[in-house]
Image: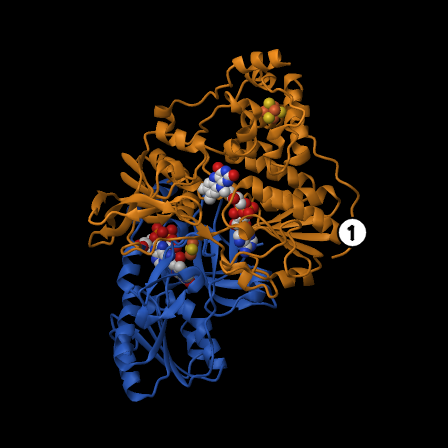
Chain colours: A orange, B blue
């Protein structure tokens, strides 16, 4: 056994083939190109098939990781994809966007001494293989129960609920405010990281399973939840995400050229501004771009700006490199694409010309002090360290809050002090009868997989309600 | 859904009316609210106010001026055609109550936005004086409808082709001097709203304006539509589009509307070339 372990460690972790940084920083084509079947099998064979797999414990939806990896070693890629689907409705998405280093791969035993198994790459491989080569059969749906469910929001969390409840034989209608389903997966995460064709294919599967999708319906404005019940729905799931951009409330923040990340990415991805004028929605193409913040959203904004032709893109962040919350892979890709990180720096005001167009911003240098409530060292301004950065485009990417449009129009729905819906952490039940909630609207901005996990839990509880009672 | 069932050209084809099938929206819509329309998958999301609604028939009416590529594409849509996307009702409705004598000032397509508000104010028991303005009489829209929604009615034209020869602000000043006015609603081009607001501020008369910043989603998720009102940043699509005129930073709004001037020209030129 020990012998086997040593041998396996010697096979290096698969390296994902990628577009060359100098080429890709100017196009919107996906960066990682995917493993070949041979690479996938070699990588899958590195897995030790642990008896008590630590990786599974690190996965928020407990994918049978050793199980699907074994199937890859056996060249049975379709079966591997099906194994993934048992726990995860969107493996092609998760393989691309999950923070594996904090989840499954972070706990993989091989990572203690060397490099963990590339679980994310393998997940992506199996799902892509099945999408491209599979016969496209859809899961068997159970007999109709005659119950109707309204799913509000078509992000990963709503899609998961819809899929699970369809499988259990309920009738599901998804209501989506935008003209295309997918939530952040279509309006936020860029094409070069998550091709939209993948999301469309997942949604098409749901439709084949019988899901109805009503786009262009803003629940709370077009129709209220109480009216949905009057129309005959038996239960509702709220998965509307955290769609309210935070600004910094600094002088000059309304100059032309200052965008929220939500606006910048929505114009680019959902409205396809990067294809202007083929698509009609314009997007500012900055020469000297500054992105404020350091999460995945900030990296997506910075890398988008580079692809839209920027000369320089700076990520300005008030803490240090260690605290940057983006996935490792995003930080690494951003650096390869010549995005500069300006750390321990905080903006204080923006400057503009007489037409109201942004010309620059003032920053303060920071140093790290004592740890704050989040356990991270608190950045403290260094007095007199103000300096100016010239820029013609700023993307404010410092987080988002709960959008009150739906919650304000829904009586008896308890909210916390930040406006997030209060839902049972196990079942997703809200204070309102027949209504569940999950994903970013409950947790605040989090991750795709947590939103999906919440959806899965809620779907189980909703099924109990629809078949047994509240 | 979103099928055009009636269409009319006004003001020499520069302004178009569409009556559109939208049962759900027509039942919910209140005066002052807007919808977002998209002509096709590659199109922009364009906010337009509902000039009228007919819940029995399940329709809404929009009236828009052809100013750029998107509205030019809208103009090509005929009876029987459908919009690719129609979303609404959006925005906060006008707060309608009986306050006494009110003045409604409208210019351009602002008149279409003003109409349901004026009608609701009158129905609520207010005495409505309407002042409409246009460059020339043949560009004036909805004269009859607005007359029916008003107790007193004035027209102003820049070229003197009808009514008062001059700006709406001249008549506004006269009426304010003569009568004890509780509230003014002014909707039209930004300069018109700005100058009306300056006059009413002087007289201390509460004034509402409807703002039209560039929008994307119309649900408060992007911040594109931000306007400064009383030194605070507001999102016009959810906090408005109506605001207290005396607090609005009109100059900032005008500048922000010019954000994409070059791109709009590129778009329009490409559109014209492909039509030739
Ligand atoms: C740019 C960006 C990059 C990210 N990168 C990553 C990453 O790499 N990895 C990761 O794990 N996570 C990432 N995240 C976070 C992740 O995308 C979210 O946590 C996740 O999408 C939340 O899912 P959700 O289903 O709760 O909501 P969302 O995905 O936000 O979907 C909510 C949907 O509800 C719709 N909606 C809102 N209000 C209404 C209404 N009133 N009526 C009808 N529909 C409504 C919205 O239009 C939207 O389509 C990223 C987020 C962003 C913005
Ligand atoms: C809440 C709201 C309600 C509106 N209601 C109406 C209405 O009932 N009737 C109507 O005719 N118009 C209305 N508008 C304005 C309308 O949305 C714009 O005229 C339209 O978006 C122009 O699109 P375009 O592509 O044809 O022109 P573009 O090429 O985008 O622009 C051409 C010109 O119009 C200006 N413009 C661009 N966007 C806007 C905008 N949002 N508002 C005003 N000017 C703009 C530009 O500065 C430019 O000079 C409303 C706007 C808002 C925000
Ligand atoms: S922890 Fe690593 S080696 Fe063990 S089963 Fe999971 S992926 Fe395989
Ligand atoms: S249009 Fe996006 S927030 Fe108002």
Q: Compared to A43, does B132 lie above or below? A: below
Residue appearing at x 65%, y 43% in the figure: A456
Left or right of A165? Residue A385 is left
Res B150 quadrant in image: bottom left
* Total count of labels: 1
Coordinates of residue B122 in the picture (x, y in percent): 46, 81
Coordinates of residue A375 in the picture (x, y in percent): 44, 45
Q: Is residue A2 visible?
A: yes
Q: Which quarter of the rendered image does ligand 2 occupy? A: bottom left
Q: Determine the chain carrying the residue at label 1.
A: A
Name the element at disc 1. Answer: helix
The residue wearing badge 1 is A467
Q: A450 or A137, which is in the foreground?
A: A450
Residue appearing at x 46%, y 74% in the figure: B95
Q: A189 or A431, which is in the foreground?
A: A431
Q: Compared to B116, does A195 lie above or below? A: above
Left or right of B93? Residue A437 is right
């Amino acid at each position: 056994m020990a012998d086997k372990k040593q041998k396996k460690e010697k096979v290096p972790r698969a390296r994902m083939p990628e577009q060359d940084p100098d080429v890709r920083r100017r196009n919107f084509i996906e960066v990682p190109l995917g493993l070949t079947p041979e690479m996938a099998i070699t990588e899958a064979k590195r897995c030790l098939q642990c008896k008590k797999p630590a990786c599974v414990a690190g996965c928020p939806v407990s994918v049978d990781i050793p199980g699907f990896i074994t199937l890859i070693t056996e060249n049975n890629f379709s079966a591997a994809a099906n194994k993934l689907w048992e726990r995860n409705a969107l493996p092609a998405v998760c393989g691309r966007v999950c923070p594996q280093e904090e989840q499954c791969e972070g706990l993989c035993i091989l990572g203690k001494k060397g490099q963990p198994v590339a679980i994310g790459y393998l997940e992506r491989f199996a799902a892509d293989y099945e999408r491209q080569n599979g016969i496209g059969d859809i899961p068997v749906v159970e007999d109709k129960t005659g119950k109707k469910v309204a799913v509000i929001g078509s992000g990963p969390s709503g899609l998961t609920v819809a899929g699970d409840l369809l499988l259990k034989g309920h009738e599901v209608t998804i209501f989506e405010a935008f003209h295309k389903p997918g939530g952040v997966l279509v309006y936020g995460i860029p094409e070069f990281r998550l091709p939209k064709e993948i999301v469309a294919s997942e949604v098409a599967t749901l439709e084949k399973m019988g899901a109805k999708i009503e786009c262009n319906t803003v629940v709370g404005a077009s129709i209220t939840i109480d009216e949905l019940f009057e129309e005959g729905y038996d239960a509702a799931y709220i998965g509307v995400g955290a769609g309210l951009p935070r600004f910094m409330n600094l002088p000059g923040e309304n100059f032309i050229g200052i965008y929220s990340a939500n606006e910048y990415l929505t114009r680019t991805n959902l409205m396809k501004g990067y294809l202007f004028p083929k698509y009609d929605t314009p997007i500012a193409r900055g020469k000297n771009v500054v992105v404020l913040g350091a999460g995945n959203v900030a990296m997506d904004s910075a890398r988008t700006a580079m692809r839209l032709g920027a000369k320089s893109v700076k990520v300005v962040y008030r803490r240090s490199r260690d605290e940057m919350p983006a996935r490792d892979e995003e930080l690494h890709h951003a650096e390869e694409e010549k995005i500069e990180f300006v750390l321990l720096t905080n903006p204080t005001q923006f400057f503009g010309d007489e037409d109201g167009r942004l010309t620059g911003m003032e920053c303060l240098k920071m140093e790290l002090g004592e740890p704050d409530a989040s356990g991270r060292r608190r950045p403290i301004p260094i007095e007199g360290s103000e300096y100016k950065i010239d820029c013609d485009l700023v993307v404010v990417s410092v987080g988002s809050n709960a959008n009150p449009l739906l919650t304000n129009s829904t009586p008896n729905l308890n909210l916390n002090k930040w406006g997030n819906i209060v839902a049972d952490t196990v079942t997703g039940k809200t204070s309102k009868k027949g209504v569940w909630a999950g994903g970013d609207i409950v947790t605040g901005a989090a991750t795709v997989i947590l939103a999906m996990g919440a959806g899965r839990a809620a779907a189980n509880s909703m099924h109990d309600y629809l078949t047994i009672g509240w | 859904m979103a099928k055009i069932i009636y269409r009319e050209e006004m003001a020499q084809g520069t302004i178009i009316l569409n009556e559109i099938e939208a049962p759900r929206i027509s039942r919910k819509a209140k005066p002052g609210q807007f919808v977002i329309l998209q002509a096709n998958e590659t199109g922009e999301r364009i906010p337009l106010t509902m000039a009228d609604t007919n819940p029995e028939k399940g329709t809404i009416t929009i009236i828009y001026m052809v100013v750029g590529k998107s509205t030019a594409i809208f103009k090509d849509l005929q009876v029987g055609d459908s919009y690719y996307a129609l979303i609404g009702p959006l925005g906060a409705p006008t707060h309608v109550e009986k306050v006494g004598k009110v003045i409604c000032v409208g210019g351009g397509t602002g008149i279409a936005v003003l109409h349901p508000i004026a009608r609701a104010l009158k129905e609520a028991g207010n005495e409505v004086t309407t002042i409409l303005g246009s460059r020339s009489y043949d560009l004036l829209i909805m004269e009859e409808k607005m007359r029916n929604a008003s107790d007193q009615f004035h027209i102003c034209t820049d070229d003197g082709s009808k009514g008062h020869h001059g700006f709406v602000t001249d008549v506004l000043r006269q009426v304010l001097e003569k009568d004890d006015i509780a509230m003014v609603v002014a909707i039209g081009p930004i300069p018109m709203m700005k100058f009306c607001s300056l006059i009413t501020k002087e007289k201390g008369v509460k004034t509402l304006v409807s703002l039209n910043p560039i929008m994307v989603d119309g649900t408060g998720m992007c911040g594109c539509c931000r306007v400064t009102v009383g030194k605070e940043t507001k999102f016009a699509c959810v906090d408005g589009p109506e605001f207290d005129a005396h607090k609005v930073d009109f100059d900032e709004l005008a500048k922000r509307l010019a954000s994409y001037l070059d791109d709009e020209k590129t778009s329009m030129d490409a559109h014209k070339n492909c039509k030739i």
